Every structure is written in structure tokens, then in C-alpha cells.
Amino acid sequence: MKMKKRSLFAGLALMLSASVVLTACGGSKDSAQDAGGAAGKPVELIWYTIGTPQKDVDRVMEEVSKYTKEKIGVTVKMNMIDFGDYSQKMQVMTASGTPMDIMFTSSWAFDYVQNARKGAFMKIDDLLEKQGKGIKDMLDPAFLSGSKVDGHNYGIPANKELPAQEVWRFNKQLLDKYNLDIKNVNSLESLEPLLKTIKEKDPGVIPFSVDKNYGVFVPYDYVIEKMPMAVKVDNQDYKVLNILDTPEMKQTLQTMHKYYKAGYIPTEAATMVSSTDVQKTGKWFADKATTQPFADNLWTASYGYPVVSTPASPAYIYNWSVMGSMQAISANSKNPEKAMEFLNLLNTDPVLRNMVDSGIEGVHYKKVGDDVMENLPESKNYDMPTFSLGNLMITYLNPTDPKDKWDGFKKFNATGKPAALLGFNFDPSKVTSEIAAVQNVKEEFWAPLMTGTVDPDQIIPQANQKLKAAGLDKIMEEAQRQIDAWKATKK
């Protein structure tokens, strides 16, 4: 697997052991002949996926197709659409009936739940039982149970990190320079002495790097991501609350405002689009991020200087973490059984998975161990987003990766605690106009509050007044009704 330029969590971005072996490598020459009909012609599968289009995609898919034709009687045509264009273009193409068999979907791009309900994807419950047994054997059950929509599976989650965990990240150069210890940093408040030291001793450094996308951690599970209503993350009363009215949020926002006034947070944080430029310069001390096993190694390699982290939250399994990377079969696919056979092979066969991920052996990469690879110069023409292409646990390691990398993912996944609403997906159809109005109000207040730019004691009452006028109470009532009905069906 390459050192990818992009990763999820974005997230975002990357689970079980590399010892998963070929439980379902698929058929044989005979089955391939049968699959293609009397003349033995293979079935072509059309695959749309996310990522910057790569020069050598067709070249690699030629080799992929030789392999899959032999194994299961299919060839593959991959179409890549860049990250920023993917959701919009896929909406247009699915609405117009563009031929396709397999498509990338997620909680953050080409919305999985929304498009499942729109009828863009095929129900795959039966296909998983028949052609997808290897997938079911390989995945942690929480992936499939947590990604059901109205009781049915419409997509196959990538086998990756299962929970999401927030961490405080630190520029280790500055920790060492000022002899600062992070072992007792376990909350936003506990950052204060370190931020104060950096502010006083190194005025050219941003003590706490925050931009307009920053979201504070509070122990709640949002009913709709980035909407101000949630339930307690780790209990079972399921009462829907306005997140701005919770004591945890009020305290956290007061601390953020205190830090802003102290000069720890950039004055322009509420309007900064990204912190990427700051990270390139190394002129930052601390920030918050979503982690995965060995993430410190990845951040260090990416930034070119050492980064270390410490937990800012427990590891919770949310709907959005389960649905962070998925493959769905188009509702209009003419070959759904073959599409599932291919997805089963992709997720269980290391030869196919690594070819799709890293290209052609001897051209784009070379093996330097049984499960270790190095990029060759031609890899610049085939640099794929690993997280978006299926089971991570059977991808090859980089030479710098720890040998127990996938065991680390397995242990991390075992620590995950199901969030309260795991498996619940809100149906917005009865409150669509209210949701749009609330989103507009939220845009006015959210970034200034989250970044500490404004005084929460003054602004939260103003925000709540406008949120209520926009219809937040009606949305919360509908959410409570749906959650109560869902709770009644839980065993």
C-alpha cells in the first residue's frame, strides 16, 4: 500500500488482521465460462469510484480484468471522479440512468443513507448470503449491522478502523524544545498550562490551531451530523436534546472562548478554510484530530516533522464511522450477482485487492517481503486513495509500517463502544423545509461558537431563538418519535 496523499477522517480515512485469508477467492475457469453465457464472453462491470483520476487506471484495469476474468468471468471498467465533484456528478448520473454496476458511497460523499432511500442502490441482503459469504466472514458484524438502512443492507463497508476517536495532537519539536509533558492531558481544560507556555515563550507559533471546520468533542451522538440535536452517547434514555443547551457543550464553548481571548486560538479561526498551510510551516503547537492506529507515524511522514498525540475522547462506533467508506451495487445494474462476486473477491483476495490499490507489480511497485511493498517511479501515475477501495487489512505494508499494523487495527476496533444511535438513520422527509432553515441559521452561529470567537453566554440564547423560529423543535419532535419507534424494535 502506498503512502497515500489522501486519507479519510478526513477523515477523516483508515481494520481487522492481515491474517484474513482467502475465504472466497471465487470460482474457476469453468464458472467463468458459465458466467459469460454460451460463448464464454465475460461480463463487464462498470465501477465508479472517488479520487483524483489517475493516468494508468485503464492500464491497471486491463491487468485486473485478466485476473477477474479467469477467477469469476468478469472484466472491470473503472471510472474515477475527483473528490470535490463526486457527489454532484454521481447524483446527476444516477438520476439519468447512466449504466453502472458498482459505486463508492459514504457518510460524507454521495450520501449513503440518502441515496439508499432514493432507490439508487440495490438491496443486497440476499446477495451477501449467496455471493458475499467471504465479506460476511471477514467483516466485524458491527459494520453490516450499523450500516443498515430501514432494516436492509445497501452497501459493503470497507474493512478499516471501526470506531472514531478524537485525539489532541502536538508538534513534538515544541514539546521537546520547552520540555513539556502531555501524559496528564486528557481534556480541553488540561491543555491550558501548555498553551500558556507556548504563547509566552514562542509568540510566532499558534498555540492551538483551529479553523472554521473545528468541532468540539462532547459526549453526545448527533441525530444528524452537524445539526444541533443529539442524545447522550453512552446511555439508553435516547432523549433528544438541543446540543447547545447541554452543560457539557456550554462548558466546552466557555473554555474555547477563554482560550480565544487569551490569544491561544487564531483571531481569524472562524473564517479560516483550512489549517493545511499552518501544518506545512510547523508553526503550530496543538490541535485536535480523529485518529486511527499508528496515526502518529502517518502524520509525521506527511508533515515532515514528528507529531505525537494523546486521547481526547473514548473510541465510539458511530453511524458515520461505520459508513465512512462503502461500495454499493447500482439499482440499475444488469449483473448484480456478478457485481457481488467481484466485491467478494476484492475484499478477500490479496492479489486482486493490492492490484486495484497499488497497480501492476514490477511497474508501479515491487515486493520486498511477503506482505511488504515499495513504490516504483511509475507509481506517480497510479496513486489511489486506499481507504475507498475495500478491505484495508489485506493490503501490503510499506517498509516503514510496523509488522503488527493490522493487529493494531484489530485491537483498536475491539476497544470501540457502540454510540447510542448506532444503526439508527433519521428520515428527514417530514421536516425537509425545517432542516434547510435550521441549517441556514446554524451556519451563522456554528463556526464562531466552536472556535471560541464569540462569548457563548451571549450568543447561545440568540442562536436558540433563531433555531426555534426556524423549526428546530419540530425536527427534534420528529427525531424523538422515530428514535422511540426504533428503540422499540431493538432486542
Image: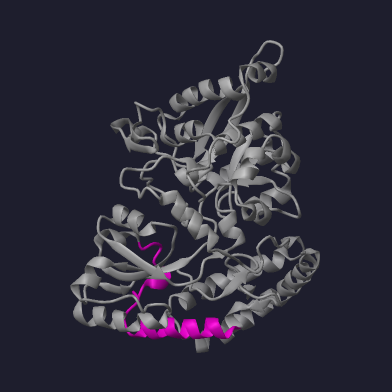
Q: Quadrant of residue 438?
A: bottom right
Based on the picture, tell me whether residue 252 belongs to the magenta stretch.
Answer: yes
* Residue 147 visible within the image: yes
Residue, far top: 39
- Label the magenta part by its dominant secondary structure: helix
Residue at (53%, 45%) from the top-left corner? 86
Q: How many marks can you see?
A: 0
In the image, 284 versus 469, the foreground residue is 284
The quarter of the rendered structure image containing the N terminus is top left
- Which region shows up in magenta? 246-275
In the image, 415 versus 356, the foreground residue is 415
Name above or below for residue 149 compared with residue 99. below
Residue at (50%, 26%) from the top-left corner? 64
In the image, 204 versus 39, the foreground residue is 39
In the image, 322 versus 466, the foreground residue is 322
Q: Point out residue 55 in the picture as x, y percentages from the top left corner.
A: 40, 31
Name above or below for residue 235 compared with residue 164. below
Q: Point out residue 185 in the picture as x, y percentages from the top left corner.
A: 37, 77
* Residue 278 visible within the image: no
Q: In the rendered view, does 485 fall on the left or right side of 442? A: right
Based on the picture, tell me whether residue 422 belongs to the magenta stretch.
Answer: no
Name above or below for residue 476 compared with residue 132. below
Q: Point out residue 9 in the picture as x, y percentages from the top left corner.
A: 47, 57
